[in-house]
Every structure is written in structure tokens, then in C-alpha cells.
Image (cartoon, coloured by chain):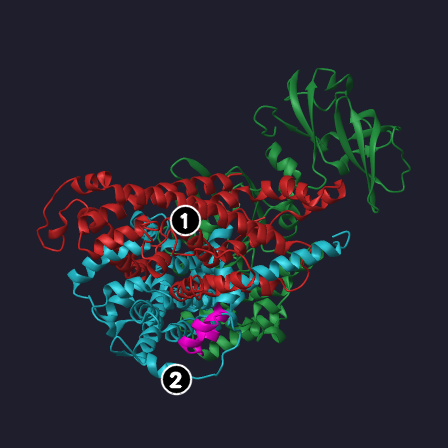
Amino acid sequence: MLKAAPLVLRVLAYGTAILVSFGCLYPFFWMLVSAFRTSKAILASPLRPWPESLSLSVLSELAEIGGTPLWVYAGNSVLITTASTVLGILVTALGAYALVRRPDFWLFRAFRLGFLATIMYPYMLLVIPVYIVMYKVGLLGTYTGIVLFLAVGPIQFFLFEQFFQTMPKSVLEAAVVDGANEWQILFQVVLPMAMPVVATAAIITFLLNWSQWLPILVVSKSPATYTLPVALLNLNGELGVNFQGIMAMSVLTTLPVILFFLLAQRRVMSGMTAGAVKG
Amino acid sequence: MAAVDLRAVSKTYDGRQLAVREVSLSVPDGELAVFVGPSGCGKSTLLRMVAGLESISQGEIAIGGVRVNDLPARERDIAMVFQDYALYPHKSVRENMAFGLRLRRTPEAEIRRRVGEAAELLQIGPLLDRKPAALSGGQRQRVAIGRAIVRQPKVFLFDEPLSNLDAQLRTDMRAEIKRLHQRLGATIIYVTHDQVEAMTLASRIAVLNAGQLQQYDTPARLYRQPHNLFVAGFMGSPPMNRLTANLTPQSIEWGGGASCQRPTGWAAPWPEQIPLVLGVRPEHVMVGPAANDALAGQAPVVLVEPLGAETLLTLQVGQQTLVCRASSELSVAMGDTLTFSVHPRHVHAFNPDTGASW
Amino acid sequence: MVQNSHRPAAPPVGVFWWFVAPFALLTLVFGVWPIVLAVQTSFTASATALQPQAKWVGWANYAVLWSDPIFMNSMLRTLTYTSLAVFSTIVTALLYALLLQSVWIARGRLFFKVAVFLPVVTPDIAGYVVWRWLYDQSFGAINTALEALGLPLFGGIASTSTVLGAVLVAELWHHVGFYVVIFWANLALCDKGQSEAAQIDGANPWQHFWHVLLPQLRPALLVNSVYALIQYLKTFTVVAVMTKGGPNESTNFVSYYAYQLFDQGRYGEATAMATVLFTLILLLAGLAMRLQGGRRSQ
């Protein structure tokens, strides 16, 4: 830039940005503070920026929600999210690879279209027929059913598709000339090259799947398979006035995601928006 | 090592586009053949058909006498050096070179030996444990060549390997490749758009244009006896002067009022009167009074380009221009009128409609 | 320059079947089959939907929807809200991205970027739960603060006149960051040469934006507006957590209404609504692809 910006404008600019950031971050702050305060205290002075005491007694209250221990929900979240992430990455990477290597094959084109149609469908409403499908294949209420449903998602697919499309074809051809068959090409040449994308996709998938709630609610037959977000929803409805409990639960649900995100923010941000930016 | 034979090879895309039209040629065992031509002429497509990376629409390709049309690339015993090197980014130099051998379950000792030899030949020994990202363009190119050498294939295929290097490096690598060829005695097919590379490296050159083979000959014959206008204009830098002229019983008319005397040696079987395209290489345009029976004339100088070792002069002959390679000792300025002459034996004649040479 | 008109000899499909199989299976079983099933169910009587021999009723479910004032209102409401949401999201995101990318902010860009993106990755349930309590009439932080400042109280999600605004703010909080990052990246891709030429020509910031940046951003703005449209048409979680469709059906959007019907066992009508929404989205997606394709050919 040829000249420095005037001070007034800079102050206004920073002021606006700080205001916006405050608006974005305040809910988290309030959530965190409230988790440590009793419901009475929250009701009395909601804006107090620091808890009166750092009591963790709420955790024992939370320990039993709707008859199921807290650690079951937490465990479910970890288990279901991890399993669906691992499965999803594997399945989607292989699928995207095949579709990119043979885009002209009509059946592959059909698979891709089917996938696109699936992600177009109002996701929340997909659970209605999926409920019926789960019923018919007998996976209703099982971890397997939930994990399978959560496995495929648009962002992972597009990340992999984009990567495989921009991978230099000559490296693949060099491997062909060197004598590799398709399995060897995939495992010894392509996948090592794809590691960064795999990492990005894995992190994003984990973040997104952790937040899922409706599919799990619908497919579950009992709270035994609920994850943290689902339990939180129930809590919000059930214990109408236990704010501390609700906030503590929110913190529990949100904290892992935030930590994960902060550790890899650049990757996550560029990965999640990759499809939309390139177009 | 083996010979490569192409018989009426064609390539069509979508049943319509003819990328390669019925090319036939043979590369004898141990020779370095260069496929050269402008962008889109089909030279890379042809190379990739030999490699097995493109299917052969029509015709036949044989390596070592064996028809390979239906053989996949990995079974043709060929090695390829790509324009962008195509090194495996996550493998070390050593592993890049060893990969093909490992896939064929070559014994470890043998792999070590071959990699070592190739590394020494290409002087990349100290780089063996580095990854491609840590190498310069020239080094990567050597590794790509090394990867091909260790395979000890029947045929080496080079796809514009020097295009991504800067000018100085290109000159050095060109010489290295020539030395390698002499050392290894390998059969090499080399694709390039640079006719200087073609001239310096090739045993024989195949000039291609729009998918068709124009001429397949030694560099010398290609240069001195081009079969058509395209080849004449493609080989040589600065390119051959090609002027349209009207041959009459007494003179050669260049158009725009310029003309010169028809050489006496140009009697039968030359027709009395005919339009022609005449070609003269710049180095054959002499400045100064003419010897007997030479094509001679006078023309003004419209451009002077001093190159140091010589000077390029552009003369205005009627409506057309004639480029002349003159000695740099000559002091000439724009606007001067020069006398020029060309010995008849240095004049090429082409049919103005078909481009074929007389 | 490598010419890339080559289409390599296509490798035999064989191996790739193995690679694509699990993906294809999951997509078919949990994607395509449910969609087909949903369309099919929309033509059956709700009571019989789960039975092996469902009763075919043709367009009856759709007819019910057409004559149901709740559905029509819901549709209208959804479209209104969605348009409003898309407009505010895109405009806010663009303005904020411009601000953050501008010369007036020299340091701390990453902090602002992360701060605005944090709500995007937050589990939406947790986020909306907090917002619900922030909006509370008696002790929500927002009204407490307004009271302390002597300003009129905000009706939040309790009053029909303010609930849409309240929901919108909450959704903006959750979604805007995504678009800010997208526009940020698009801005970075803009031609610096043109901007410098404009500066030399003496353009002020508004002229610079209008004549140099906006034309370059137009395709991205269009495409992302359609994405946002599709995203907001599916508004669901915020309603489920904060308002449950109320007060007085004022936030009963189509997707939530459909879910309510599903909950009540009215499968036929629920899937009919879903199918309507799906068709709408497909049309919009087709529009998006047309716009994108146009952009690529420029």
C-alpha cells in the first residue's frame, strides 16, 4: 500500500473487529463461567464474569441424566466419533480415488450422482427414511448402524476428490511404467502422497461427527447409545432449571471440539472451505 | 536393447479426432531417434503409444520384433523419463530408483549394484538419501534418468525431458544425454519441440506435423534435403528463407517489381514458366558481387541484428524479406543497398500448392 | 508447456470395483435407498408405512399438504426467513472479510479469523443451548445487560415479533464465520495488479470495492448465495433447541414441521414435505452448477 491508513479508520476497524469477535466468543465464555456457578447464582447475577467458587459438584449431579451415567455418554461420543471417522476416511478415500481414476465409467458416474443426491437431501429429514431402512436391516439401536450412517459425508469426499484430481498424473504413469499394479500404486505411491489430506479430512470429520445429534437420536432405541450432544438436548428439556448442569454439559460437549480446532485451525478452515472457494 | 517398429500407427479420440495419422518408421537397435514438431503435432501421443500409456487405435507397434499392441505398459520392458520428472515425492532418491526393481522382486544386492552404478554415471551419489523436494531441477532430472537406467529396459523413452530446465542447464544436460547414449548404446526415442536438441542428439529425426510424419532422416539429410516446406522451415535457426516466386523463361520474379536473372543451369527438366516457392538458408545468402551463374540481386537492408559472432541482415526483396547471415566484420547500416547472391545449388524449390520439394 | 490433451489408456475397471465398493454400498444403503423410500412413502398412507404392504394413496399426502394452512404458512415462513438469512449472512460475511483483509487491520488477523470461525465448528446444540439462555427474558445475559444500560428489553424467543430476529442472530453466529473464510480466500485471489492500478488512478475505497473487487467476486458471491440458500432451507437444530416451532408456530419451518409429523407417526405426510423440500434444493443446486460452469468458461 502506498500510504499508511489514517488513525481514525484504523481505530474504527479494530473496534469493529473486536466487537464482532466479542460477540462470537462471549457465548463460550458465559458457558464456561456458568458451568462453575450454582443455578441460583446464575439467576441472581447472570453477567458476573467470574464464578463465585470453582466447584465441580455439578459433575456428580450430571453423573446421572435420564438414568444413564455421564461417562456412558462421553464414552459413546468418543467411540462413535472415532469409529465413524476412521471408517469414513477409509471408505471415502478409496471411493473418491476410484471415481477419479475412472471418471468415464458410467456406473461410477452413477455412484457419484447418487452420493451428490444424498448430500443434497435435507440432512435432518433423511433420518426419517433412514429410520425405516435401519428397521428393515435390523440395525436400529445398534452402534454399528449409527457409525455406518455417519461414515460418509460431503466434505471428506470433496477434499479427497480434489486432491486426487490435482495429483500429477505423470507420477502415476511412472509407477505404471515401473511395473506397479493398481494395488501397489494405491498403497505405495498415492496414499503416502495423500497423508496431509488424510490428516485434514480426519480432523474435520471428527469435529463434524462429534457434533451430530439427530441421526443418533433417531437411530437409538435407548439413551444407552446417546452421545453428548443428544444427552445435552435431553437435559435441556428435562431438568428445566438446572442451568449449571446444562452449562457444564455444554462445556463438556464443546471443549474437545474447540481444543481440536485450535490445534489445527488453519488446516480445518482451509479444508472446510476448500470446495467452496475453488468452486 | 531392441529395435522399435511403427507400422501405420494411428490414434483417434472419440472416433473423430486424428491425433496421429498412419505413422510408419523403424528405430534400429541402439539408435537415438528424435520425434520433433510443433505443439500438438502428435509426437508425445506417439511416444505414449510406444510406452503403452495410450492405446493404439490402428496399426502396429513392435518392440524387439514382438507386437506390443495388447501388452500393458508394465510388460513392455520400457523405461520413461517424464517432462516433469514424475519422481515419487515421499521416497528418497535411492528408493525412487529402486522402486521398479523392487516391484519385480530383484535381489537386494543386485538393486544396490545397479543403483550405485547409475548414481555414479549420473553423479548423483551424494544425493541418494535426499527427497526430491530437496533437489534442484537438474538434479531431479538426473534422478529421473537414473530411475530409467537401473531398469535396463529394451527401450528408453524421453518425453521432453529438458523443457522445464533453464537454457544453460538444458545445454549441459543435452551433452550429458548424448554421452549417456554413447556409453550405454541404448535404443532411445526422444521427444522434443526444440529442433536444436533434435539436431545435436539424433541418429535420425522424425519430423511430425498435425499427426503426420513429414520426414524421417538423418539430421544432415533433413537439413540439406528437406522433403517439404514444413520440414524446410522447421529445421534450422534462423529458419530457411521461403519466398514465393514466378519462374519465367528469362527471370525469377519475386513480386513487387523485384526480379533477378534465371540461372542458365535451370533449363530442363525445369518448366519454362511456373510459380514456385524457393527456399534459401540464411547462411547461403552471400553479400557481395556474384559469381557466374548465381542468383543475384540488389536489395535494401531493413533490419540489422548483431549477434556478436555474426550479424543477421534482413533484406527487402520486392514485398518479401530475405534473411542473410553475414560476417560481423561487415559494416552495414539500415537503408544501405546490398548486392547479394546465392549459388543455384543452395536453392530449394517447393510446389506452392502441396509444399513438396522438387 | 505440457499439452494435456492426453487421455491415458483407461486401466481396466476390475481393481477399482474393490476400491469403490464400500463407498458405493454405504451411499446406496444409507443414501439412495432412503431417498427412494422417502419418495415412495410419500405416496402411501402413513399408518401403513412400516408394514411390508403399504397402502398406495397416490398424491393424497401432497394434496393434504397443499390444503393444510399450517404447511403453507410454514413454507412461506421458511422462504422468507431463508431469504433474509442468506442476505444477511452473505452481506455480513463479505463486509467482515473486506474489513479483515483491509489495510486498516495490520495485526491480529488470524485471531479475528479464528474467533469468527470458532462458532462454526462448535456443536450446534451446545451453541444454541447457550443462546437460548442468553435470550431468556428474566435472567438472560442479554436482557440483564440491556437493563443495566437503560435500554429497552429484547423480546428474544418469547415474543412472536422478535423470535425470528433472535433465531437469525443465533444462526448468523453459527454460520457467518464459514463464509467469512471463503470470501477471505476469494479476496486473496483477486488480481493485485488491478488494485494497484486503481490506486494509482486515484480510486477511493468505495470505488475500489465497487469497480475492482466486486466484479471479480461476483461469481463467488452468486455461488455461495446458493450454497447458503440450500443450507438455510434446512434450518432445524436451532428451532429444536430454542423454540420448538413456537411461539405460536412462528418458527415452525418446513423441516421442523416435517420432523414433528414424523414424530407423530404421520410418515406419509412427513416424507411428502421432505420430498418437496428436496426438489426445491435440487433445483437450486442445478442453478448453482449452472452458475459455476459459467464461471469456469469465462
Q: Amino acid at mark 1?
A: Ser
Q: Which mark is residue A80?
A: none
Relative placement, left or right, of C193 versus B96 is right
Which chain is red in the picture?
A: C
User: Residue at point 38% right, 81% down?
Assistant: A58
Q: Is residue B78 above or below residue A37?
A: above
Magenta stretch, residue numbers: A28-46
Which chain is cyan in the picture?
A: A
Question: Splitting the image into 4 quarters, where does residue C25 fall?
Answer: bottom left
- The reply to whether the magenta stretch includes residue B118 is no
Q: Nearer the viewer, residue A206 or B154?
A: A206
SS under mark 2: loop
Q: Which mark is residue A57?
A: 2
Q: Which mark is residue C161?
A: 1
User: Callout 2: 10 Å neighbours few (<14), some, many (20+)?
Assistant: few
Q: Residue furthest front?
A: C150
Q: Amino acid at mark 2?
A: Ser
| Residue B333 place in picture, x, y as percent | 89, 33
Q: Is residue A63 above or below residue B179?
A: below
User: Residue at point 76% right, 38% down?
Assistant: B283
Q: Residue furthest left?
A: C53
Q: Quadrant of the C terminus of chain B?
A: top right
Q: Are marks 2 and 1 on the same chain?
A: no
Which chain is green in the picture?
A: B
Q: Nearer the viewer, residue A177 or A65?
A: A65
| Residue C85 place in picture, x, y as percent | 45, 48
